Structure formats: C-alpha cells, structure tokens
Image (tube, rainbow, N blue to C red):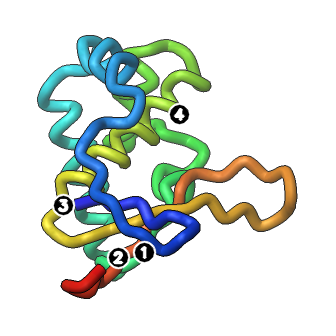
Amino acid sequence: MLVKIGDNGKVGPITAQAHDERFRQWMMHLAPADFQNICDALNIYINTQGGGEIITSSWIPGADWTDTPFEPIYTALKNWEIARFFYGLIVWKVIMDRPETWSFGRYPKNEGDVIGLTYFRVEIPAWA
C-alpha cells in the first residue's frame, strides 16, 4: 500500500497508478513475462538490499541495464528517457501493490540533482 503524507501530517492512501494513461500505453510494448521479471527483481531488491524498509528507485537498476531484468524496458520503448520514466512508474506500481504501508519523497543529494523517488515503510497509527 502506498500513502501520501501531507505537509499537515494527514495521511491519504494512493490507489491509482501515477500517469496511468502513459503507463498503460507503454505496458502494451512490454511482454507480460518481462513485466513479471521486472516486478520480481524489484521485490527481491526491496526485500534484500532495501531490507524491506527503504529504497531509492534510481539506485536499483544502475546505469547499464544490459543483461538485467530491466533491459526489456529499453528494448520495448527504444528511448532512454522514456524507458527511465516508465521504469519509475513500474516501481510505483510494485510499491503500491505491496502489503506493507509505504510513503515516498524526493531527496536529492545536491540542489538541482534529479533523483528517483525514495520509498520508505511507515507505520500509520490507527488514529491517523
């Protein structure tokens, strides 16, 4: 489950795919088996490298996707910028579909850095 934590501390569930129309269009170019392999690789990374607690999406695939589960994203779209954006939407979906509660933010190391979203597990009190 994915939630947004507002500036006022209010927590709201996110139940929709970000950029859903684009996501659905790009999914038509990706074989279902490739999509499943990508999701499996992301979940393994989240559970191991991320300790099931925190990940930054752009750190997962590395700069060279050759011979990784992520290569079919580029192969399907033939455009590096679009492939990276689509990859981020796949991460969003994987996090949204997980049973734990997660939230997110963008935390660049330096001002002006472009960096993927950082996702982190949260415990939401019953009264929130």
Residue at disc 4, secondary structure: helix
Q: Earlier in the sequence, mark 1 or mark 4?
A: 1
- 1 up-or-down from 52: above or below: above
Measured Cα–Cα span from mark 2 to mark 3: 11 Å
Residue at disc 2, secondary structure: strand
Question: Can residue 31 be seen here?
Answer: yes
The image quadrant that residue 47 belongs to is bottom left
Q: Earlier in the sequence, mark 2 or mark 4?
A: 4
Measured Cα–Cα span from mark 2 to mark 4: 23 Å
Total numbered labels placed on residues in the image: 4
Which part of the image, by quadrant, shows the C terminus? Answer: bottom left
**Residue found 86% across the figure and 59% down from its top:** 111
Tag 3: amino acid: Arg
What residue sits right under mark 4 in the picture? 84
Q: Earlier in the sequence, mark 1 or mark 3?
A: 1
Tag 4: amino acid: Arg
What residue sits right under mark 3 in the picture? 98
Q: Is residue 105 left or right of residue 115?
A: left
- Front disc: 1 or 4: 1
- 117 up-or-down from 53: above or below: above
Measured Cα–Cα span from mark 3 to mark 4: 21 Å
Whole-percent x and y of residue 22? Answer: 39, 18
Q: Earlier in the sequence, mark 2 or mark 3?
A: 3
CB atoms of marks 1 and 2 within 8 Å: yes
What residue sits right under mark 2 in the picture? 121
